[in-house]
């Protein structure tokens, strides 16, 4: 069974019968005829036989991976952020910010490439910019650089601002489980003002696995 | 000859009775009555504003009306109070402001009926145009709740199962007591509930507050049309609550 999480920038794909680990393919490099059996994410309805909602996949994946009755799971994607809060093992609250969380992960990746930065080598700053969204936040970077801050310092403050935004969006928990590509960004993880448990990029794939009919 | 009376909100029963007695035709200006770009209203009302009230202005720009009755009291909103000024300056016809504080309850059989949610809302909003009492209806055991005002985009309602009970201001509408805050804030804590508000509506504060207190709820808002993310949130919430969206319980 071919499962796929079609992200805006990257697709996560796994063949359940192969026993192989999931693979990541840049969305723009994915074969245009690729079809999954079960999928989630942008274009899932068009590129799969059956598709499920991203929040549903996230919640089901969280249930598989987190052995707790009460927790909050935040997924930071390329284009949007979403969260699911479990209470007593049930979904109690959720949110999906597809508009104002616009291009968050995408912008962070873009900035690293543009300024040649390694996020693993940058310490989380004490303060961050007040960032409404990725695109609007970039003007803060340009202003800071013009005012004499280093590019690294300015981008770090931008990333911290984005992290604070995401934390605020999911109701400011003391502890959260993090899903998505930003789990691999140490600066972003360190900038979240709470205890963070990174779960990696395949939480939604786990949710798809959990949605397969049991035979 | 029958006159065409535009109404906004829920005018007092005595006003509706008078219109019915005169044999005049009621046009609900809160609902889209024509196909035209809503941005045509931008010269008269801010773009970042309640889509229902923008729709009122859009209707007023295009429809031939003889009179407009706008409820501007606690049963509607301050937005209507202010938009009444816009409409009064826009149209060369009488614009009557009312403050509906009716307290005689008519009941809310449609809110708890087994009808599809879209049909419940169609009948409830249509019911504003009549002063007649309701006939008896079957009460269905609920599987989820919808709290809020009638959305500008009714397609949102198709996501819900027929076993959805209606709460909030829509229930007050059916009850013909639109200013009844006690009824408006009634919810069922045992029912997974979607708290809906129009974007830029003052009721969003109440929706968010009640959703935060409710054990299984989400608050969503929607502007002119329901976005994919709003639909997805509702679908996921229903699905994860064990309810098949737009169908029966799973």
Image (cartoon, coloured by chain):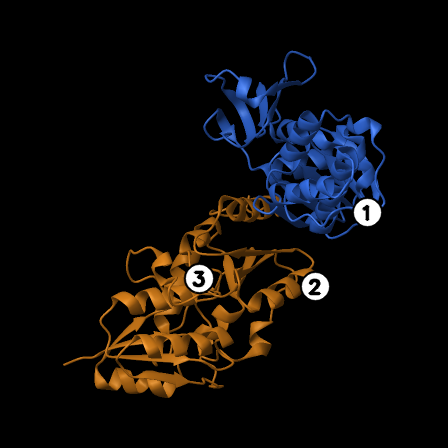
Q: Residues within 10 Å of mark 3 (few under 14, many from 20)?
A: many
Q: Which residue is mark 3?
A: B51
Q: Do tags 2 and 3 sit on the same chain?
A: yes
How far is mark 1 from mark 2, CA to CA? Answer: 32 Å
Nearer the observer: mark 2 or 3; the answer is 3
Nearer the observer: mark 1 or 3; the answer is 1
Check whether the beta carbons of the residues at disc 1 and disc 2 lie within 8 A of each other: no
Secondary structure of the residue carrying tag 3 is helix
Chain B display color = orange
In the displayed structure, does residue B67 sit left or right of residue B80? left
> Which residue occupies 72% across, 24% down?
A116
Q: Do tags 1 and 2 sit on the same chain?
A: no
Q: Which chain is blue?
A: A
- The mark nearer the N terminus, 2 or 3, is 3
Where does the image place residue A161, in percent across and percent down from the top left?
74, 45
Does residue B125 sit above or below A146 in this rendering?
A: below
Q: Which residue is mark 1?
A: A127
Residue B218 or residue A210, whichever sits in front: B218
């Amino acid at each position: 069974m071919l499962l796929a999480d079609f992200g805006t920038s990257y697709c996560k794909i796994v063949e359940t019968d192969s026993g192989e680990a999931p693979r990541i393919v840049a969305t723009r490099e994915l074969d245009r005829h690729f079809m999954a059996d079960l999928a989630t994410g942008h274009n899932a309805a068009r590129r799969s036989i059956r598709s499920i909602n991203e929040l549903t996949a996230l919640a089901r994946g969280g249930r598989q991976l987190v052995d707790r009755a009460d927790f909050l799971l935040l997924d930071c994607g390329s284009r949007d952020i979403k969260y699911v809060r479990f209470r007593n093992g049930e979904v109690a609250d959720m949110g999906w910010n597809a508009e104002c969380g616009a291009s968050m992960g995408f912008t962070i990746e873009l900035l690293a490439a543009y300024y040649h930065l390694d996020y693993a080598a940058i310490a989380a700053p004490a303060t961050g910019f007040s960032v409404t969204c990725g695109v609007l936040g970039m003007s803060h970077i340009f202003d800071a650089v013009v005012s004499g801050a280093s590019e690294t310092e300015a981008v770090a403050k931008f990333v911290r601002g984005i992290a604070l935004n995401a934390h605020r969006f999911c109701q400011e928990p003391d502890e959260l489980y993090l899903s998505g590509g930003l789990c691999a960004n140490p600066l972003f993880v360190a900038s979240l003002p709470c205890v963070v448990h990174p779960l990696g990029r395949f939480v939604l794939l786990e949710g798809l696995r959990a949605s397969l009919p049991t035979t | 000859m029958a006159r065409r009376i535009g109404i906004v909100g829920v005018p007092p029963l005595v006003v509706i009775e008078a219109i019915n007695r005169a044999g005049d035709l009621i046009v609900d200006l809160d609902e889209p009555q024509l196909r035209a770009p809503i941005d045509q209203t931008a010269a008269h009302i801010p773009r970042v504003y309640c889509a229902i009230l923008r729709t009122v202005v859009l209707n007023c720009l295009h429809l031939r009306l003889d009179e407009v009755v706008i409820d501007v009291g606690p049963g509607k909103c301050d937005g209507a109070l202010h938009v009444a000024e816009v409409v009064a300056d826009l149209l060369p016809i009488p614009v009557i402001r009312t403050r509906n504080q009716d307290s005689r309850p008519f009941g809310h059989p449609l809110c708890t009926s087994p009808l599809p949610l879209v049909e419940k809302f169609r009948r409830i909003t249509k019911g504003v145009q009549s002063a007649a009492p309701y006939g008896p209806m079957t009460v269905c055991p609920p599987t989820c709740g919808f709290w809020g005002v009638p959305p500008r985009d009714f397609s949102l309602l198709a996501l819900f199962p027929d076993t959805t009970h209606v709460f909030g201001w829509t229930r007050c509408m059916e009850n013909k007591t639109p200013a009844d805050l006690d009824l408006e804030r009634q919810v069922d804590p045992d029912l997974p509930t979607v708290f809906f508000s129009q974007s830029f509506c003052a009721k969003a504060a109440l929706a968010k507050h009640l959703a935060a207190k409710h054990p299984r709820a989400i608050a969503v808002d929607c502007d002119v049309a329901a976005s994919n993310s709003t639909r997805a949130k509702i679908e996921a919430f229903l699905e994860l609550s064990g309810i098949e969206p737009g169908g029966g319980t799973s």
